[in-house]
Image (cartoon, grey):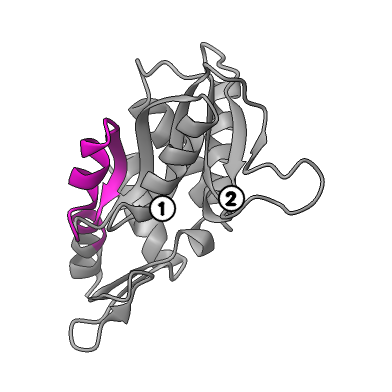
Amino acid sequence: MTTIREELAQAFHATGSFKWDKEKGFTLASGQRSPFYVDCRALMAHPSARRLVGHLAIEALTGVEINCLGGLEIGAISIATTISDFAYAADPKREWRTFVVRKQAKDHGLGKLIEGAISAGDRALIVDDVLTSGGSLLKAVASARQAGLLVSHALVIVDRKEQEGREKVQLAGVKVISLLTIEDLTAVDQQVG
């Protein structure tokens, strides 16, 4: 019987959200090259994949005390919303509010860096799609902490296990939870190939 984790790994392949090019590779946001391309925005465009992410996240967050969750625009928005919706529908019901961290503060209105339902002292979970160098997670953690949020955990859909990302985030006092690793995605690719 296939587990939900295996179903999510398979969904990356079925939606074209994972590519593996051993020869040429892909240029990452950091400028470095990797043989893997992971596109969680494409994955999260599919309701069946969002259900899998929501289900796995709720399981992974058992025992983690939070009031709200969010991360950097744009990628974290659908992840945070999906997890929040699943938490609200779960038994027991949890009402985890969401927020988004802007890449830069707005130059109009209230000029906020963080938008959403937060209050200083809230326990916040930072979410992101893919963990590589840890840069986007660390930026979101720093912004959330600057806004008075207490951040002890982060959740990513895929840990690429490259560039010591997990180690860098954990050095900032944040425990990293990943729903999948790059090995989960390559294992499916090897089964299909």
Badge 1, how many Cα within 10 Å: few under 14, some, many 20+?
Answer: many
Number of marks drawn? 2
Q: Position of residue 128 (x, y in %)?
A: 43, 47
- The numbered dot on residue 47 is 2
Residue occupying image coordinates x 42% and y 15% = 65
- Which residue is labeled 1 in the image? 136
Q: Nearer the viewer, residue 121 or 94?
A: 121
Determine the residue positioned at 52% across, 64% down.
42
Report if residue 168 lies within the magenta region. Answer: yes
Q: Is residue 174 above or below residue 161?
A: above
Quarter where residue 62 is shown: top left
Q: Is residue 26 left or right of residue 68?
A: left
Q: Specify the quadrant that holds the C terminus.
A: bottom left
Q: Is residue 123 above or below residue 186?
A: above
Task: Identify which residue is drawn at 17% across, 54% down.
Answer: 164
Point out the residue furthest to the top here.
92
Secondary element under disc 2, as helix, strand or loop, is helix
Q: Amino acid at mark 1?
A: Ser
Q: Quick one: label 2 or label 1, which is nearer the N terminus?
A: 2
- Alpha-carbon distance for marks 2 and 1? 25 Å
Vertical position of residue 95 compared to residue 180: above or below: above
Residue 104's quadrant in the figure? bottom right
User: Which kind of residue does numbered mark 2 sit on?
Assistant: Pro
